[in-house]
């Protein structure tokens, strides 16, 4: 589709809508909005103008103008995404929600919170610290990401085994549609089957169906007790085969079950100058349990530890205070950063397979590593089968060779994933990075249903065009 440029006349109208100070066209200032955490040289694209509105009404007026003039609009938050979802592939207007960072209400009676999309996710639980409540929709990039981005991607993270992902806690949304309507979806209601659940359709839609301008999220009582376990195993298969036994034989649903292969642990420990005894282990599980009764949490952690040892764990280390928990979690959280030191060029993937099939995936990763002479560390959320298998550029390869290898290796990885009953993404999204592989994964009828939904919301295809799939 051919879009129209942002002319001086359009800029004048935009300044009238959002105010002069909330319109940026200076190339030096708007460069930051041309990319997210995907490599800028591969996926970046400059917008023509960046807007930082303050209200839903302003965004609605912008969308009406853009729809009338056929100008593409890309929603933007903290730009911490890993799929290219916030990149303005067709230029046009970027609408950043960074100014919309107000916490409107903490409703203690209903255990709900009303807030704008530009609130940093980490600050939500900081605000709730004294109340004994917390927001359980926890992504791993909690310190930097915006709540609006978490909703757009239906972000998950290390606590998803017990608590689920962001969408479980989104009770209501205010959304500006691509045609400029402001709609209220859901509310402070725990149950609601009044028609289609459009609220959950917006969750995970990657900014292609509308811009979230307000969210009502559910809060939970915060557990008072936590214990972490670091279990060392001789190989990946032994580690992963233990995961379902924790829940079936142990009858315990842990807060987290994180998997790390030896390469991931070794690289992260060296990066942190951490001296965990990883040399003997071929894989590790980081397991955490929480609750409100110390004796129950301790008993659960002992049960899990014994179960790991009964299933050939080499050793199980207990982290029962903040310092030791932070020590083992730091190794997990810093894996991606550690590999950036090895090579700044990598493809951080987000595949999902049935949990029991994780060991079957490992030989494919070894094969890809050997075939293309690259490192392929694997880590992630073992409890729900969501793995970050990462292609890391060989420093000896040229960039031209790397791009060629990356494309072929990704095809191999995705084919193996599909063969094992998996799919492209569990929490990072499709965006523009994985779009061309959608036809490999999904039935044509399913893709056509998605395209039909997109057309119903966005008849002129101006809202974040070029993401997830192309309209035919």
Image: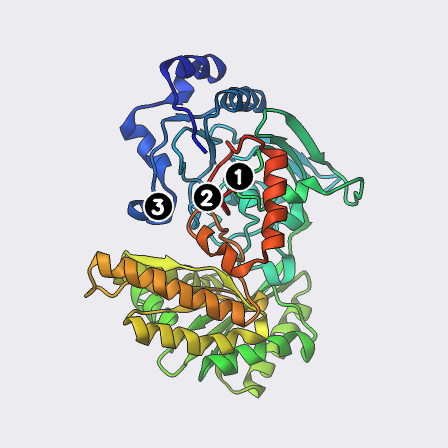
Q: CA distance from mark 3 to mark 1?
A: 17 Å
Residue 207 numbered tag: 1
Residue 312, image x, y percentages: 52, 87
Residue 292, above or below 90: below
Secondary structure beneath disc 2? loop
- Which numbered disc flags the more N-terminal residue, 3 or 1? 3
Q: Residues within 10 Å of mark 2 (few under 14, many from 20)?
A: many
- Could you tell which of marks 2 and 1 lies nearer the N-terminus? 2
- What is the number of the mark on residue 43? 3
Number of residues whose C-alpha sits closer than 10 Å to that of mark 1, classed few (under 14), some (14–19) or many (20 or more): many
The spot of residue 199 in percent (x, y) is: 67, 40
Q: In screen coordinates, is 310 left or right of 372?
A: right
Q: For this view, does 226 lie left or right of residue 30?
A: right
Location of residue 311 (image quadrant): bottom right
Residue picked out by circle 2: 85
| Residue found 63% across the figure and 25% down from its top | 181
Which class describes the residues within 10 Å of circle 3: few (<14), some (14-19), or many (20+)?
Answer: some
Image location (x, y in percent) of residue 96: 46, 31
Q: Tell me if I can see residue 462 in this picture.
A: yes
Question: Secondary structure under badge 3?
Answer: helix
Q: Residue 246, image x and y in percent?
A: 63, 76
| Picture layout, residue 419 above or below residue 217 | below
Q: Secondary structure at mark 1?
A: loop
Asked whether the residues under the numbered discs 3 and 2 touch, taking CB atoms below 8 Å apart as contact, a structural biologist would say no
At horizontal 46% and vertical 37% (from top left) the residue drawn is 77
Alpha-carbon span between mark 2 and mark 1:
8 Å
Image height check: is 263 above or below 14? Answer: below
Pointer 2 with pointer 1, Cβ within 8 A: yes
* Cα gap from disc 3 to disc 2, whole angstroms: 10 Å
Q: Earlier in the sequence, mark 3 or mark 2?
A: 3
Instruction: Name the residue nearer the viewer: 177 or 125.
Output: 177
201 left or right, relative to 58: right
């Amino acid at each position: 589709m051919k879009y129209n440029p942002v002319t001086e006349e359009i800029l004048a109208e935009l300044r009238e809508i959002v105010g002069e100070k909330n319109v940026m066209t200076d190339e030096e200032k708007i460069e930051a909005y041309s990319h997210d955490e995907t490599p800028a040289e591969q996926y970046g694209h400059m917008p023509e103008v960046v807007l930082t509105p303050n209200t839903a009404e302003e965004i609605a007026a912008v969308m009406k103008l853009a729809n009338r003039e056929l100008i593409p609009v890309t929603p933007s938050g903290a730009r911490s995404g890993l799929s290219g979802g916030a990149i303005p592939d067709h230029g046009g207007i970027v609408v950043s929600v960074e100014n919309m960072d107000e916490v409107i209400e903490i409703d203690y009676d209903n255990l709900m919170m009303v807030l704008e999309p530009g609130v940093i996710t980490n600050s939500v639980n900081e605000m709730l610290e004294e109340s004994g409540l917390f927001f359980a929709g926890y992504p791993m990039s909690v310190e930097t990401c915006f709540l609006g981005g978490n909703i757009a991607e239906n972000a998950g993270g290390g606590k998803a085994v017990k608590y689920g992902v962001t969408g479980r806690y989104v009770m209501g949304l205010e959304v500006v549609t691509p045609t400029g309507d402001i709609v209220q979806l859901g509310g402070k209601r725990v149950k609601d089957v009044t028609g289609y659940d459009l609220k959950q359709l917006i969750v995970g839609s990657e900014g292609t169906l509308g811009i979230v301008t307000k969210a009502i999220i559910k809060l939970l009582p915060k557990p008072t007790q936590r214990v972490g376990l670091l279990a060392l195993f001789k190989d990946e298969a032994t580690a992963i085969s233990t995961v379902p036994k924790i829940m079936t034989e142990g009858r315990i649903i842990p807060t987290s079950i994180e998997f790390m292969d030896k390469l991931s642990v070794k690289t992260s420990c060296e990066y942190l100058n951490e001296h965990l005894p990883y040399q003997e282990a071929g894989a590790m599980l980081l397991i955490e349990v929480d609750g409100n009764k110390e004796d129950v949490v301790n008993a659960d952690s002992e049960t899990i530890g014994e179960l790991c040892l009964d299933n050939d764990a080499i050793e199980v280390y207990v982290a029962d205070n903040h310092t030791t928990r932070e020590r083992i979690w730091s190794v997990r959280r810093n894996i991606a950063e550690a590999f950036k030191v090895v090579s700044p060029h990598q493809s951080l993937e987000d595949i999902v397979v049935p949990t029991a099939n994780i060991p079957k995936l490992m030989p494919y990763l070894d094969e890809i590593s050997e075939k293309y002479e690259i490192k392929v560390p694997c880590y992630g959320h073992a409890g729900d089968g969501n793995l970050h298998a990462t292609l890391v550029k060989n420093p000896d390869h040229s960039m031209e060779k790397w791009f060629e290898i990356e494309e072929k290796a990704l095809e191999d990885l995705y084919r193996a994933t599909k063969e094992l009953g998996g799919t492209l993404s569990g929490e990072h999204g499709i965006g523009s990075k994985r779009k061309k592989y959608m036809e490999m994964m999904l039935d044509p009828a399913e893709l056509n249903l998605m395209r039909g939904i997109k057309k119903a919301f966005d008849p002129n295809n101006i809202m974040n065009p070029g993401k997830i799939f192309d309209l035919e």
